[in-house]
Amino acid sequence: MNFFVYQPEYLFSINTIFSPLIFKYSGDMVIGLLGIIVCLVILIWQKYRGRKFSSQHIIYVCTLLWLPLFFQFFYSNIIEIKNTIFMINKSTQEQMRWRSCAIDFNQQLGGGLCQVSKFVELVKKEIPKGSMIAFASGSVSLFPEYYLISDYNITTDYSKAQYILLYHPLENFNLAEDGRLSTIEVEEQGNKIIDKDFLGYFQVETQINPQMVIFKRLTP
């Protein structure tokens, strides 16, 4: 059983605490089945013993069955408060960044979520507002898109983009010496690089690492 074990926050559990496990089964299911059995016993007792149970008795039973889930919820929240109380006087931006990094660490996302605010600040610094930008497809690229959509025109068509942004992309990109930017595929045997789609002529506007790059289209 894992009752009273701290459950950190994940992307798929924001503002939610999952049910604990009871002998490898969900606590919700076990307690629910136990509640059904108890209700059946009450009904049988009522029928064959002639004793009547009020709705209040049912409420008492449900409350008792619910208490383990409440204690798990209470315990996880106490630990969460203990872990985050030092952030109470920090700015909203710092609190958001810390929460994102905590989720990133707990879910082992490799920094993709933790670095969102840093990349958003970089984009706002390097790219004029109102520019047409395109994000390379990525598992967490929707997060920087969300923070930039009010200031930029975001497209999925690379041919229309003034800037192409890589943020932990799923595809591989190659920028040739002459400025030709292409998506590429690397064969496992022999590490042979094959160009897939030519995207146009670009230059690196700024780069934090190979996973966080801003390409600017070169004018003819």
Image (cartoon, helix red, strand yellow):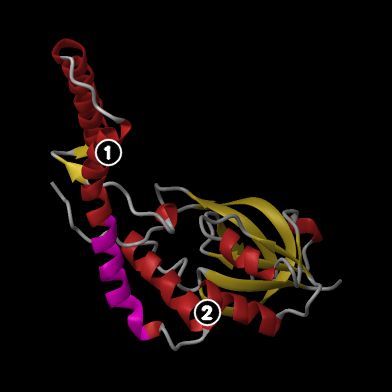
Residue in the picture at 54% in, 79% down: 118
Q: Left or right: 146 with respect to 91?
A: right
Frontmost residue, 9 versus 126: 9
Residue in the picture at 27% in, 76% down: 82
Q: Left or right: 188 with respect to 74?
A: right
Frontmost residue, 205 versus 51: 51
What amino acid type should be assigned to the residue bearing mark 2? Ile
Residue 147 position (above or below residue 84): above
Q: Left or right: 68 with respect to 85?
A: left
Q: Quadrant of residue 9?
A: bottom left
Frontmost residue, 110 versus 87: 87
Which residue is label 1 attached to?
A: 62
- Residue that lies at the very extreme toward the top in this rendered image: 48
- Residue that lies at the very extreme toward the bottom in this rendered image: 89
Where residue 167 appears, x then y in whole percent? 55, 66
The label shown at residue 208 is 2
Where residue 215 appears, x then y in whole percent? 67, 72
Magenta segment, which residues?
Answer: 73-86
